[in-house]
C-alpha cells in the first residue's frame, strides 16, 4: 500500500509541476521583439478643380432645363429624398414636391427670361460636395433683372452627382 501511495503522490507532484510550468512559461522572445504593425490611414486626394468643372457642367444643363421651362428635367437633378429651401417659401421635401413647386414657378416666369448659374466654389470629400454659386436672370433683351446666390449639396450616387439639398435666395431686384 505504501508503494501505491508513493505512486499517487509522485503523479500528483508531476501534475502540479506540469501545471506550474505551463502557467509560468515565458512568451517566445521572437514574438515579444517584433513591433506591432499598424496600417497607415489611406489619404485620398480629391481633385476639387475637376469636381468643380463637373458640377458647373451640371449647372449648365440645369440652366438649359430652366430656360426651356422643363420642370421634369430640373427635378431629375434631385434625389428622391432631396430638400429644397427656396426664397420666401417653406422647405420643399422630396423630388415630387420640388418638381411641382418648380413647375408653378416656371409658369409665372416672364416670356424670354433666362437664367445662368456659376459655380464659384466646391468643397467636400468627393462623395459629398457642397457647391456655392450665383445665378443671373436676364430679360428677353439681355438686361439683368435679378441676381441671387445658392448653396447645393451634391452626393455621388451610382457614379453621378445628384442634388440632395439646396438653398437659394435672390438679391435686391435690379431695376
Image (spheres, rainbow, N blue to C red):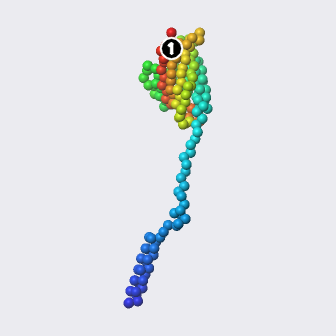
Q: Nearer the viewer, residue 30 or 70?
A: 30
Q: Nearer the viewer, residue 9 or 160?
A: 9
- Left or right, 70 with respect to 24, comes to right
Give the quadrant of the N terminus: bottom left
Whether residue 62 is visible, yes or no, is no
79 to 70, vertically: above or below: below
Q: Quadrant of residue 35?
A: bottom right
90 to 40, vertically: above or below: above
**Residue 58 coordinates in the image, percent (x, y):** 59, 27
Q: Residue at x 58, y 41 (%)?
A: 44
**Residue 117 coordinates in the image, percent (x, y):** 56, 21
**Residue 92 coordinates in the image, percent (x, y):** 45, 25
Q: Nearer the viewer, residue 148 or 164?
A: 148
Q: Quadrant of residue 127?
A: top right
Q: Residue at x 54, y 46 (%)?
A: 41
Whether residue 114 is visible, yes or no, is yes
- What is the total number of numbered labels drawn onto the structure image? 1
- Left or right, 17 with respect to 69, comes to left
**Residue 165 coordinates in the image, percent (x, y):** 49, 29
Q: Residue at x 61, y 26 (%)?
A: 57
Q: Nearer the viewer, residue 25 or 12?
A: 25
Q: Residue at x 51, y 19 (%)?
A: 148
User: Which residue is under mark 1?
Assistant: 108
Q: Residues within 10 Å of mark 1 (few under 14, many from 20)?
A: few
* Callout 1 secondary element: helix
- Left or right, 89 with respect to 127, comes to left
120 to 146, vertically: above or below: below
Amino acid at each position: 500500500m505504501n508503494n501505491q501511495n508513493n505512486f499517487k503522490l509522485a503523479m500528483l507532484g508531476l501534475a502540479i509541476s506540469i501545471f506550474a510550468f505551463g502557467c509560468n512559461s515565458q512568451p517566445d522572445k521572437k514574438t515579444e521583439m517584433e513591433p506591432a504593425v499598424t496600417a497607415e490611414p489611406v489619404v485620398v486626394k480629391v481633385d476639387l478643380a475637376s469636381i468643380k468643372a463637373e458640377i458647373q457642367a451640371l449647372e449648365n444643363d440645369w440652366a438649359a432645363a430652366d430656360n426651356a421651362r422643363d420642370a421634369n428635367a430640373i427635378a431629375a437633378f434631385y434625389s428622391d429624398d432631396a430638400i429644397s429651401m427656396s426664397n420666401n417659401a417653406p422647405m420643399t421635401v422630396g423630388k415630387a414636391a420640388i418638381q411641382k413647386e418648380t413647375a408653378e414657378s416656371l409658369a409665372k416666369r416672364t416670356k424670354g427670361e433666362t437664367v445662368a448659374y456659376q459655380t464659384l466654389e466646391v468643397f467636400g470629400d468627393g462623395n459629398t460636395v457642397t457647391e456655392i454659386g450665383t445665378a443671373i436672370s436676364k430679360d428677353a433683351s439681355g438686361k439683368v433683372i435679378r441676381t441671387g446666390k445658392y448653396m447645393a449639396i451634391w452626393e455621388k450616387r451610382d457614379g453621378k452627382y445628384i442634388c440632395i439639398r439646396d438653398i437659394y435666395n435672390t438679391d435686391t431686384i435690379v431695376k
